[in-house]
Amino acid sequence: MPGAFAAMAPKPYVTIQLPLFNEKYVAERLIRSVVALEYPKDKLEIQLLDDSTDETVEVVRALVEELQGEGFLIEHIQRPNRVDYKAGALQYGLERCKGEFVAIFDADFLPDPKFLEYSLPHFEKAQVGVVQTRWAHINENYSLLTKLQSYALNAHFTVEQTGRNLNGHFINFNGTAGIWRKECIADAGGWQGDTLTEDLDLSYRAQLRKWKFVFLQDVESPAELPAEMNALKSQQYRWAKGAAECVVKNLKKVFVAPHLTLGTKVNAFFHLMNSFIWVCLLLSGLLLVPFLYVANKQAGYEGFMPFLVVYHFAFFALLLFYTQANATVSLRSGKDYLKFFISYPAFLSLSMGLALHNAIGVFKGYLGIRSAFVRTPKFNILNKRDGIEGKTYVKFKLDFVTVLEVLCFLYFCFGIYYAAMHENYLALPFILMQALGFATVLVYSFLHFRRANGQSSGR
C-alpha cells in the first residue's frame, strides 16, 4: 500500500474538512493531529468549518493563525448562519475547497498520520467515490458505558461494513474518518440537510449513481466515545431518527433502480431499516408481561409458555454474533473473553433501556417530523483520571419521554414481581434486564448532569 501511494505522481490535492460546533475541549487536539498527517504541505488544504457560538471560536482562531505562520494551508471558515447543520457546513466548505479529494473528521477523532497514505491509492480506480476507515476507540476502557458502546460499533464495522462491502452491496460513509472524491459528491447532488444522517443519505444517493465504496477494516481511525449518558442518548436518537428519514427518502429509489441486483436491494432494505430494531426491541419487552398474564390466566393458553424459549435463543444468537464481531479487533486473551461474557447482559440491558427513546425517534423519522441536529459533545476524556466534573455541554431535560421511561421502569418492576409470583422463571431474566436498562439510563442521565454542573456551581 505505501508503495502504491509513493507511485502516485503528481500527488493529488486533498482538502481536509473539520466540521465543528462548540467543541472547546477537543478542537485543538483534532487540529494538531490533522496537521501531523504525512502529506506535502502544498498539496493539503485544511478547512475549519466552525459553526461554534462559544469559546471554541477563539481557540480555533488562535491556533489557525499559529499554523498559518508555519506554512500550513489552513482556513477558519464561519458561515453567516447554521442552516442545515453539519450537512450545510460541509456543502459550504465544498463549494470553496480546492481538493480533488475531500477527507472529513469529526471533532473527537485523532487520524493516523498515514491516513492519506493508506486511503488514496484506492482511488486509482475511477469508479471509487469513497474510502471509509474503521473507527477505533481511544477511551473504551474508561467506563462500562464506553466499553458497551465499543461492542456495538465493533460489530457494525467488522461484520456489517465488511460483509456488505465484500459482497458488493451498499455500505455507508460513517460521517467521519473517510475520504470522498469531490466529483462523486457533486454527481450525487451534494450534501443535503433534510435528514439527520446526511452521511447515510449521500452514501445511498452516490451508490445509486453507480459509484463504488471501499471499506478498509485494517485502517483504524481512533475517536473518543461518549462518556456521559445524555450525550450517548442524543447520538443514538440522531442516528435512529436519521436512518428512518433516509428510509422515506431513499428506499423506493433503491427498489426501482434497474442496475441493482435483487440481493443488493434486499440487503439495502435491511440496511436502511436497521433503526426499526429499536421498535422491535421495545415491543418485545412491553408485550412480555401481557403474554405471561394470558398464559397464566386464560384457559387454553398454557401451551404458549414454551415460546419463551425464543427470547433465550435470541440471547445466545446475539452473544455469538457480538463475540465473533469483537474477537476480530478487541478480544485477544482469555481474560478479554471473560470480561466480555460478564458484561454482555449489561450490553443488552442498556440497549433495552435506550429502546423507548430511540423508537420515538424512528417513528418521528417515518412521519417526517423535523428536529434539530443535536451534536454529541466530547470532553477530552481519555482515561480514568479524566472526568466530566465542571464540564459544559451536558444537558438533561425532564420531559415527556423521561416520564415515559420512568413508567416503563415501574412497569417492568411489576413484571418482575408478577413473573416471580407465578414462577415464570424463563421470562424473569429478560424482564429484569428491561428494568435495569431503564433504571441505568434514568439514573446516569441525572447523575452525569449533576456531576457536570455540581462542581461548576460550587457545590
Image (cartoon, rainbow, N blue to C red):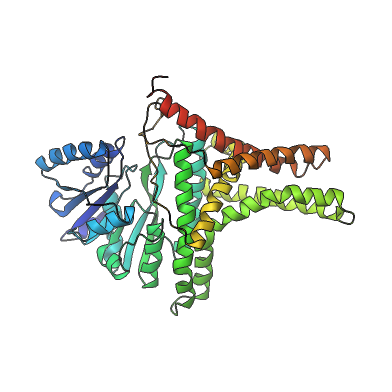
Find the residue positioned furthest to the bottom: 258
Position of residue 38 measured from the top left corner of the image (x, y, whole percent) = 22, 47
Q: Residue at x 50, y 55 (%)?
A: 159
Residue 453, relative to residue 231: is it above or below? above
Instruction: Classify residue 355 as left or right of residue 63.
Output: right
Instruction: Classify residue 39 as left or right of residue 259.
Output: left
- In depth, the one of 95 and 168 nearer the eye is 95
Viewport quadrant of the C terminus: top left
Residue 396, relative to residue 127: is it above or below? above
Viewport quadrant of the N terminus: bottom left
- In depth, the one of 22 and 182 nearer the eye is 22
Find the residue positioned furthest to the right: 299
Q: Is any part of residue 331 visible from this angle? A: no
- In depth, the one of 109 and 256 nearer the eye is 256
Q: Is any part of residue 99 visible from this angle? A: yes
Position of residue 316 measured from the top left corner of the image (x, y, whole percent) = 66, 48
Instruction: Classify residue 8 as left or right of residue 368.
Output: left
Q: Residue at x 51, y 62 (%)?
A: 367
Position of residue 331 measured from the top left corner of the image (x, y, whole percent) = 52, 41
Instruction: Classify residue 334 as left or right of residue 230.
Output: right
Position of residue 262 measured from the top left corner of the image (x, y, whole percent) = 52, 75
